[in-house]
Amino acid sequence: MKKVLSIGLVRGVLGQIVGTAVGIGLLTGIRALMGLGWKAEPAAVLGAFFGVFGFLIAVGSVSDWWKWAKGEETIEAEDFKDLPGVKRYYGVSLDHKVIGIQYGITSLILMAVGGTFALIFRTELAASGKQFLDFDLFNTLIGMHGMVLIISILLGIAAMSNYLVPLLIGAKDMAFPRLNAFGFWISVPGSLVLLSAIFVGGFDTGWTGYPPLSLRAPLGMQMFFVGVFFNGWSSILGALNLIATILKMRAKGMNMFRMPIFVWAVLATSIIALTATQLIGLSFQLVMFERLFGMPFFDATKGGNPILFQHLFWFYSHPAVYVFILPGLGIISELLPVFVRKPLFGYKWVAMSSMGIALTGFLVWGHHMFTAGIEEYLRVPFMYSTLLVAVPTGVKFFSWVATLWQGRIRFPVPMLFVLGGIVVFLLGGLTGPPNGTVSTDLHLHDTYFVVGHFHDTMFGGYIFPLFAAIYYWYPKITGRKLNDTLGKLHFYLMTPSFLVMTFGQMYIGMLGMRRRIADYDPAQGFDTSHLIITIAGFLIALSILFLFINLIRSAKHGEVAEGNIWESRSPEWTLLPSPAPAHNYDQDFRVVGDPYDYGLAGSRYIEPVLRPVGDD
């Protein structure tokens, strides 16, 4: 028992259970003293909040801050001792690499859970008529699929950013290691609260939580709101930490235009997450308060305005699309020159295009509301601002094509996923304008065309680059290579299956198939298309299963990765062994050139900084 309780994650879950019970009991006791009866919803909400804080206390992510508040001495972050072996990943660590892996494992688990939800409701949709799901559970699963995978993507972005940014800029760790650990651990109980929504009635609003439907939804709606609320905290704290790290901890000589493109992408992403995430937290919090206290923010019968929720929600949720894809596009730009053996074309333009996408992303939210009853004079400005995003995005495509032109291209598994990401994201970009122009959006809005477009954008902008990053940096993380055969099987099975799925979704969408619908009229003739889409979805899941097998198998049995296996100019490959040691670089280095000058004779990116004799 003592060994079990020594595992931080186990203590955290037990702390969440105890905290939840304390919160429910506290509110129940207060209501009893006031002569009020039992009411499940406020008790459950307070219990969820107490449960999250109970988890954080029990896992140990606030113990150092508590010692500091009491005036006790705390150790320096660099003197923090991790547990040996895999145990370090089940408890609090201050090492950015361990935290990045914790984020990554959690992200992949949630990806599997959210994907499983999709397979269940896709099986229901494979034929018209009710098969095995009742409509309430279908609605819950389709909403959970959306939000669980959104949280998975946010945690995946945090995984790549946490692990790679300090290595790429020459820092020993993140600017605020304890805040970094806290940002991860708050996402774990937040995700558990989100998943608990299934077991307390679910919800029927989809992943957006629109009122007035969300005001009448079961108790699961509140758990949905609370879970997203705490994951939003994680995103905000992580963004703050990354901005401070990038701006203040770069190696000598690394000015802004000598930073790796991935770091530029993370900086732009962090600016969005820091400034916009509060809006989705606020919108969900207001619905929580309206349900708990009767505050009439969005109930039109009481003077509220449901359109206000949509403005608050989409002011975050469309920029959030760029939170999802900007790091992925950064991965593409980061890896492309390595396998093409040419400089990245238009480096400065690509760097600034990430900032341009981040800024224009705040001006486009209204195109989600063309059919919602917003003022007509807002439609055209939002249409033009939406189309304007294509300009900085086009800069990236032009750079990628020009970089590929006449390059000495190699095709290892990471490069396959880079090229797949470019093609699929292009499809997402080309299918975007019909949703951003008023005349076509009025027909396509809330159809499966939007589903196909969104999946193209997410897979091309995040999933394909994520897999490219996994295959590329896995040897640096573990010291072993992933199996090439399984990797190619993963790519060549997933890519055509995904294209079939999304083209099928867009096809039936143009014919009028509504999204988030549990059944459809067989007379519409969608049965064959839905069956093909469902089969393609299962093939995608099978391909990702090959990745999971590869990750687990290669950790012990993979080929040992020695030296700079990709012939990269980046410091983590040229200066560090695999796996990377604690605190990264034991010797400082200076940046003396450009990061992507592949193929240029005599060019250098970094050189060691010689320390004075006797300097420790």
Image (spheres, helix red, strand yellow):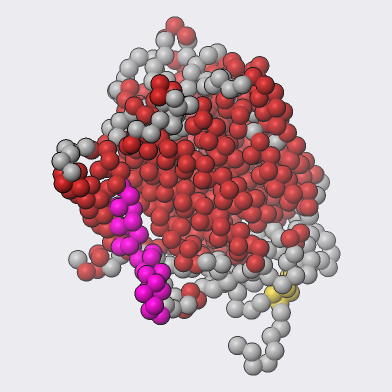
Picture quadrant where residue 504 is located: top right
Q: Nearer the viewer, residue 52 or 487?
A: 52
Which residue is found at the position 61% from the left and 29% from the top? 366
Picture quadrant where residue 293 is located: top left
Q: Nearer the viewer, residue 611 or 248?
A: 248
Q: Residue furthest top?
A: 523
| Left or right of 223, for residue 555 | right
Q: Residue furthest right?
A: 601
The answer to whether residue 591 of the structure is visible from this angle is yes
Residue 155 colored in magenta in the image: no
Magenta residues, start to end: 48-73
Q: Position of residue 346 (x, y in %)?
A: 80, 49
| Left or right of 42, for residue 490 | right
Position of the C terminus by quadrant: bottom right
Tally of marks: 0
Q: Position of residue 8 (x, y in %)?
A: 32, 64
| Left or right of 397, for residue 473 | left
Position of the N terminus by quadrant: bottom left
The answer to whether residue 17 of the structure is visible from this angle is no
Picture quadrant where residue 147 is located: top left
Judge whether 579 appears above or below 188 on screen. Answer: below
Q: Position of residue 396 (x, y in %)?
A: 73, 43
Judge whether 448 appears above or below 56 on screen. Answer: above
Which residue is found at the position 56% from the left and 51% from the top? 274
Which residue is found at the position 83% from the left and 68% from the top? 602
Q: Position of residue 223 (x, y in %)?
A: 34, 40
Residue 72 colored in magenta in the image: yes
| Left or right of 245, for residue 343 | right
Q: Residue furthest bottom?
A: 614
Which residue is found at the position 83% from the left and 61% from the top? 600
